[in-house]
Image (cartoon, rainbow, N blue to C red):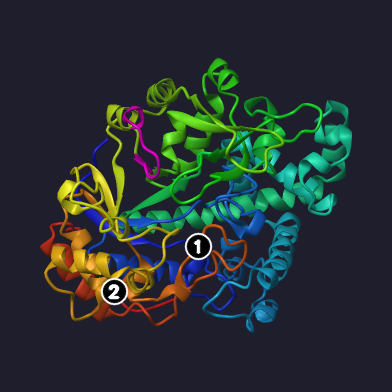
Amino acid sequence: MPFPRASGILLHPTSLPSPWGIGDLGPAAYAFVDFLAAAGQQLWQILPLGPPGHGNSPYMGYSSMAGNPLLISLDQLCDRGWLEPEELQDLTGLPDQRVAFDRVIPLKTALLERAARRFQASASEADQQDFAQFCANCHFWVEEYAFFMALKHTFGGASWSQWDHPIARRQPRVLQEWRETLSSDIFCHKFLQFEFHRQWRHLKQYANDRQIQIIGDIPIYVAHDSVDVWAFPENFMIDPDTLAPAEMAGVPPDYFSETGQLWGNPIYNWKQLQQDGFNWWIQRLKALLDYVDLIRVDHFRGLQAYWSVPAGETTAIHGAWVEAPGVELFETIRQELGSLPILAEDLGLITPEVEELRDRFEFPGMKILHFAFGSDSANPYLPINYDRNSVVYTGTHDNNTTLGWFDQLSDHEKERLLLYVGCFAPEGIHWTMIRLALMSIANQAIIPLQDLLGCGSDSRMNSPGLSEGNWEWRYPKQSLGPELAQQLRALTELSNRAARPQEPLNWEEGG
């Protein structure tokens, strides 16, 4: 469905400032929303909110429906009496412009577990009722997620396929025995989901009240080591003997890689999903729409046809394209949920069939300015070639920052860029590209915060292919001042993307 003309900022909550080593849902999140409102923005795009697994990647989470407990605000837990302020002191020495995951995770997890035990021991009747209602509303996923995480801790963090044979294969009697044994740990994980949901719901309402919608992100595939695959193995192509993926996801060889990309995620068992009326997908989208207003579907082309690589392959060379039931999936979802607030990540090898699926449901596609100046005038990422029903980005979380990108451009590409824009903005190349995005005809324009702040390559969020150092960037506390908000607002108003204030703005720097 087409969306009204608007603009916004791409920022994952882990990148927010806070005193506790990682961005969270505390004061800085509300201050960021205030900045967006002051700057006339109507969109806040985030990365997947799930609990990250391998490499701390939000795209390889332990659950496609749960929230990341590391985002829970410790300040709010203190306000509610589940923690004492002095108990947070161990976190005060952590870096303030990077997330040191190896240090943050054990320290914060210990505090979160302490809060859960206190809630379990002394929650008021009203809190207990709210908790019970949450568990009932989210029963489809929260029970199995909490059980999975408790088991994972018991088995030393090993992948579920390496657990003891009976529990890995979900033998009913053994499942019941483990549920009873781990009941206290299971409660802890359910409480953390309850608290995450409560804090996020309040933040989302705060944003919506200020005419700001949140764009979430749904990875097309889920991690093999996830509750989704362990609890619903019939939905995935899993080898019944080894429990490893029988068919793996990836993309074929192309200009950038002679061997393609082998992601290793298990391919969906689309036949089973169809027979079940796509119930797992519907539940997944319902869960995400509890958190966000709009959904960006990552690797959208895989819902028309996907690259399937047999088990045992070490590269993506020997795969094959297999058609997916994308039309039937989206028709079923529309029947169940009504309108489809979906944005399609349609980058990469896009065929007419993929475009037909995207356009059939009027999903906006993505345009990346960093890709626009390396070829001729037919380049689909040049603004002259945009459709209105699209979303333009300077770059994405997988790109370099605009300053880093420009520094690495060839002279030929710099010349083409200069020829296109006429002159570079005196404030820097990042403002040149921001202006180009905002003034385009694309209905939505999204700017990574790093570009708004003029950050270099050392501030990029993710470098695909590198296993370390990703997802760590955070912005300094005092970066978002009134002058920057006014500068962005002026361009946003001129490009007819600004929210119309419902009341006088009263924004102050915070966080």
Marker disc for residue 180: none
> Residue 202 at x, y = what percent?
45, 56
- Relative to 148, 484 lies left or right: left
Give the structural element (helix, strand or loop) at label 2: loop
Mark 1 lies on residue: 462
> Residue 219 at x, y = what percent?
50, 44
In this view, the residue in front, 267 or 410, is: 410
Which one is earlier in the sequence, the residue at label 1 or at label 2?
1
Please tell me whether residue 349 belongs to the stretch shown in magenta.
yes
> Residue 23 at x, y = what percent?
52, 69
Q: Is residue 313 visible?
A: yes
Above or below 427: residue 189: above
> Residue 3 at x, y = what percent?
24, 43
**Quarter assignment of residue 455:** bottom left
Q: Quadrant of the C terminus?
A: bottom left
Measuring 49% from the left and 29% from the top, which residue is drawn there? 282
Q: CA distance from mark 1 to mark 2?
A: 31 Å
In this view, the residue in front, 247 or 218, is: 247
Mark 2 lies on residue: 507
Measuring 47% from the left and 52% from the top, which residue is drawn there? 201
Which amino acid is tagged 2? Answer: Trp
Which amino acid is tagged 1? Answer: Asn
Where are the magenta residues, as a range? 342-354
